[in-house]
Image (cartoon, grey):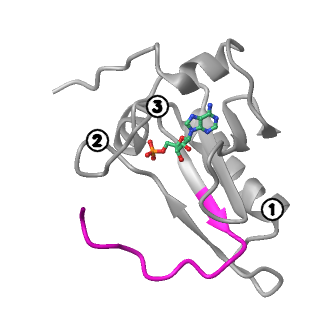
Amino acid sequence: MAYIYDDQNIFAKILRGEIPNDTVLETEHSLAFRDIAPQAPVHVLVIPRGAYTCYDHFALEASDAEIVDFTRAVGRVCEMMGVQADAAGDGCRLIANGGRHGVQEVPHLHVHVLGGRGLGRMLAPAE
Ligand code: AMP
């Protein structure tokens, strides 16, 4: 089975500069911007510039350079937002929803960086 990427998704449009975003970090292969409907005081989305639908697609098919850049971008965003899980920060939750059961709304890989308050347990019951 192949991953099918829809280049009309809203994050593809952000990457092409067709719609605005509130940028937090730009790197060679990644972009981080604030979520338009934040679920916590800190809610930033980190996306690769490449056309990957979800985390497993990216993990299987991205180049080493893209994977390193993206992973470091997530770490840098945590630090920049002060939500890193070290002695100086209060920690965060990283979420990458995928597909139907993951209830992914935008089919371009994004890691949610959530923090700034207690986030409760990991999973809520399915609706
Ligand atoms: P998911 O359900 O994991 O696909 O999450 C998609 C996220 O994208 C949601 O948290 C939305 O609030 C967010 N979102 C949708 N459109 C935009 C946008 N134009 N700029 C920033 N965040 C967006």
Between the C-alphas of marks 3 and 2, the distance is 10 Å
If the picture is divided into quarters, which one holds ligand 1? top right
Between the C-alphas of marks 3 and 1, the distance is 23 Å
Question: Which is more N-terminal, label 1 or label 3?
Answer: 1
Q: Quadrant of residue 4?
A: top left
Residue corresponding to mark 2: 99
Figure quadrant of the C terminus: bottom left
User: In x, y percent, where is residue 42?
Assistant: 72, 62
Q: Is residue 122 magenta?
A: yes
The amino acid sitting under disc 2 is Gly
Residue corresponding to mark 3: 108
The answer to whether residue 55 is seen in the rendering is yes
Along the line of sight, which residue is nearer the eye, 65 or 26? Answer: 26
| Direction from residue 101 to residue 31 in the image, left or right | right
Q: Circle 1 — which element? A: helix
The answer to whether residue 50 is seen in the rendering is no
> Mark 3 near mark 1, Cβ–Cβ under 8 Å?
no
User: Is the residue at mark 1 in contact range of ligand 1, meaning its CB lies under 8 Å from it?
Assistant: no
Query: Could you tell me which residue is drawn at 55 percent across and 20 percent down?
Result: 12
Question: Which is more N-terminal, label 2 or label 3?
Answer: 2
Residues in magenta, as a range: 113-127
The amino acid sitting under disc 1 is Met
Between the C-alphas of marks 2 and 1, the distance is 28 Å
| Direction from residue 121 to residue 40 in the image, left or right | right
Residue corresponding to mark 1: 81
User: Is the residue at mark 2 in contact range of ligand 1, meaning its CB lies under 8 Å from it?
Assistant: no
Q: Is residue 111 magenta?
A: no
Q: Which mark is residue 71?
A: none
